[in-house]
Image (cartoon, rainbow, N blue to C red):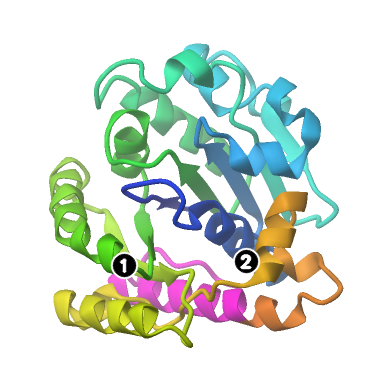
């Protein structure tokens, strides 16, 4: 099984949109996918089912690892796509303990998911590279970083890469898939300039070719807690996430012939 953390330095960069839609794109391609909401803001769960606040989820497992995965897995209409909500323990758990506190339990969780026959586990983490998020990244095979295409966002990238290098020390097999630009508005000079500034800052392989546009559709889909591809008018947007999925696959294959997701 491949585990991919979707992480960002700060909130509001479209991270959850990327996580939901990328997971859905993999599931549509026949990859048995589990999307885990490890963001105590809980936007995946919140949106995907209104009662998700009441579901037993990821942070409950960190508090009590005797909870079985069966109690946490929420199926969707797509047979290859399942979810685990954030859980109720997240309110106090999120800030609880420094990095490393939950490392063993996060690893156990991922082992349980692998034992259940999932091919891919995508984890939507809380913003920032510390606490539980640090533990998730340190336990995952790969990490991708959604980054808003705006001038201010760009300045935080070198700091982000520095943080990821620290995590690589904890997790030498971590593949940094790279930075994925979100909320891109090609008609805006600032947005275009941010994209090119980022290209100059980062080694070429660290920037995804696929960019996520700022699209009213995504906002509507998120409000309903749905992957954009399930909306009637979502086919065009679906293409973007299928392209992102293909790029993630080729990056994983490039990073190591021995772990790759076969669609």
Q: How many marks?
A: 2
Asked if residue 255 lies in the magenta stretch, the reply is yes
Question: Which mark, residue 26?
Answer: 2
- Identify the residue at horizontal 64%, vertical 21% (top origin): 68
Disc 2 secondary structure class: helix
Residue 118: x percent and y percent?
61, 49
| 245 and 2: which is toward the camera | 245
Specify the quadrant that holds the C terminus. bottom right
Residue 115 drawn above or below residue 253: above
- Identify the residue at horizontal 50%, vertical 36% (top origin): 39
Please state the extent of the stretch shown in magenta in the rendering: 240-263
- Mark 1, Cα crowd under 10 Å, few <14 / some 14-19 / many 20+, is many
Residue 76: x percent and y percent?
80, 48
Residue 229 drawn above or below residue 219: below
Asked if residue 165 lies in the magenta stretch, the reply is no
The residue that disc 1 covers is 178
Question: Which mark, residue 196?
Answer: none
Q: Is residue 115 visible?
A: no
Residue 41 drawn above or below residue 164: above
| 16 and 257: which is toward the camera | 16
């Amino acid at each position: 099984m491949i585990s991919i953390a979707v992480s960002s330095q700060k909130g509001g960069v479209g991270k959850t949109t990327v996580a939901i839609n990328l997971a859905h794109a993999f599931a549509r391609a026949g990859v048995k996918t589990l999307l885990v909401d490890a963001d105590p803001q809980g936007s995946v769960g919140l949106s995907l089912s209104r009662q998700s606040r009441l579901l037993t989820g990821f942070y409950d497992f960190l508090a009590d690892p005797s909870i079985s995965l069966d109690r946490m897995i929420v199926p969707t209409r797509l047979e290859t796509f399942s979810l685990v909500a954030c859980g109720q323990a997240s309110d106090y758990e999120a800030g609880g303990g420094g990095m490393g506190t939950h490392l063993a339990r996060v690893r156990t969780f991922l082992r349980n998911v692998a034992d259940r026959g999932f091919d891919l586990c995508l984890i939507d983490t809380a913003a920032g590279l510390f606490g539980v998020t640090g533990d998730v990244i340190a336990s995952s095979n790969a990490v991708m970083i959604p980054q808003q295409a705006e001038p201010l966002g760009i300045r935080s990238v070198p700091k982000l890469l520095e943080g990821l290098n620290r995590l690589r020390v904890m997790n030498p097999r971590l593949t940094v898939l790279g930075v994925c630009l979100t909320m891109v508005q090609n008609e805006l000079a600032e947005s275009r300039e941010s994209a090119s500034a980022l290209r100059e800052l980062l080694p070429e392989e660290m920037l995804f070719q696929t960019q996520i546009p700022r699209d009213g559709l995504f906002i509507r889909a998120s409000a309903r807690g749905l992957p954009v591809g399930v909306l009637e008018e979502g086919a065009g947007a679906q293409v973007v996430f299928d392209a992102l999925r293909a790029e993630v696959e080729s990056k994983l294959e490039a990073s190591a012939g021995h772990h790759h997701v076969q669609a």
